[in-house]
């Protein structure tokens, strides 16, 4: 300890004062960060609830506050304490070498930070949006930090995806413009079944569901367009394949709608003689030759 004090030409009293100053600066930075985050979180909740303001940029700022404030605190400590200021100047003089080393070692970190800033500016998704990332991950965007995006999947698990990765993937956003979703529901009926009756049953069961919404324009209603569009899309090997287009308020209600009407339509098909085909196999046993 004494050797270190001699190197910096300090007395024990000076070293103690500088140490107390550094602790005080860090403590003040910690308190300021807590206060600013509390104010920002309160503002986010109020704005999001009352004014319907997108909270994404505020979330990102909240996560960036710690980095900015602690960096400012370290700069203040280095500038006020003379021995550290000398060390800082020396480091700055050789910054070219350090910059090259640090830049090479932290390419991924800076890439994630820049990608996070682009996400906040261009908003391909926002906090609270339902997204699917490259057909691999699905869930609700829960947080956007300097390094990564947190997505809560439908099993209530958290997916931590680096911002640089998520920015380079194809993103399916279910909420970016309109929450309503058109659910495509597929049914196969046998060639012996009555197609018109099957379409009538599907339409009635879909329109009777509590989560069904009529998304037709006034012009389409006046023209007599059906509320639930059902199309014969192909003739399969053993079935006539139909596709129903049923609108719901959001994807969560759409999933419930699909499950419920699948059950009710199966019951109606059984009751009214509409057959849903399934694979049949014929097994032939050959007798051994004498």
Image (cartoon, rainbow, N blue to C red):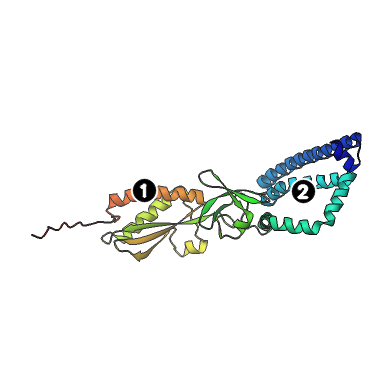
Task: Name which residue lies at 85% across and 40% down.
Answer: 4
Check contact, mark 1 vs mark 2: CB within 8 A. Answer: no
Please identify the residue farthest to the front as the structure is shown. Answer: 3
Give the percent coordinates (x, y) of residue 8: 89, 43
Q: Tag 2 or tag 1, which sits nearer the N-term?
A: 2
Front residue of this view, candidates 151 and 11: 11
Characterize the local packing of mark 1: few (<14), some (14-19) or many (20 or more) Cα atoms within 10 angstroms: some
Task: Name which residue lies at 90% across and 45% down.
Answer: 82
Q: Which secondary structure lies at badge 1? A: helix
Front residue of this view, candidates 287 and 145: 287
Characterize the local packing of mark 2: few (<14), some (14-19) or many (20 or more) Cα atoms within 10 angstroms: few
- Say which residue label 1 marks: 264
Q: Tell which tag, 1 or 2, sits nearer the viewer.
A: 2
Task: Name which residue lies at 60% across and 57% down.
Answer: 165
Kindly tell me whether residue 261 is visible in this rendering. Answer: yes
- Say which residue label 2 marks: 68
């Amino acid at each position: 300890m004494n050797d270190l004090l001699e190197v910096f030409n300090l007395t024990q009293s000076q070293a103690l004062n500088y140490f107390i100053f550094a602790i005080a600066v860090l403590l003040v930075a910690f308190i300021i960060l807590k206060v600013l985050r509390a104010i920002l979180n309160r503002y986010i909740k109020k704005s999001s609830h009352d004014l319907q303001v997108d909270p994404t940029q505020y979330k990102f700022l909240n996560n960036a506050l710690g980095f900015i404030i602690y960096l400012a605190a370290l700069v203040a400590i280095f500038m006020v304490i003379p021995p550290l200021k000398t060390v800082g100047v020396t480091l700055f003089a050789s910054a070219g070498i350090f910059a090259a080393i640090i830049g090479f070692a932290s390419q991924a970190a800076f890439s994630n930070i820049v990608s996070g800033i682009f996400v906040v500016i261009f908003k391909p998704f926002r906090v609270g949006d339902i997204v699917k990332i490259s057909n691999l991950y699905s869930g609700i965007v829960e947080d956007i930090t300097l390094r990564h995006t947190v997505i809560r999947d439908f099993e209530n698990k958290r997916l931590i995806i680096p911002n640089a990765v998520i920015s380079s993937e194809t993103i399916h956003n279910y909420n970016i413009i309109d929450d309503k979703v058109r659910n495509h529901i597929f049914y196969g009926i046998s060639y012996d079944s009555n197609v018109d009756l099957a379409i009538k049953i599907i339409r009635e069961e879909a329109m009777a569901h509590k989560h069904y919404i009529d998304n037709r324009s006034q012009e389409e209603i006046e023209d007599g367009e059906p509320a639930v569009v059902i199309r014969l899309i192909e003739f399969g090997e053993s079935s006539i394949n139909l596709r129903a287009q049923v609108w719901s308020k959001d994807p969560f209600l759409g999933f419930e709608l699909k499950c419920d009407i699948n059950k009710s339509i199966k019951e109606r098909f059984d009751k009214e003689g509409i057959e849903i085909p399934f694979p049949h196999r014929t097994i032939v046993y050959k007798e051994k030759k004498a």
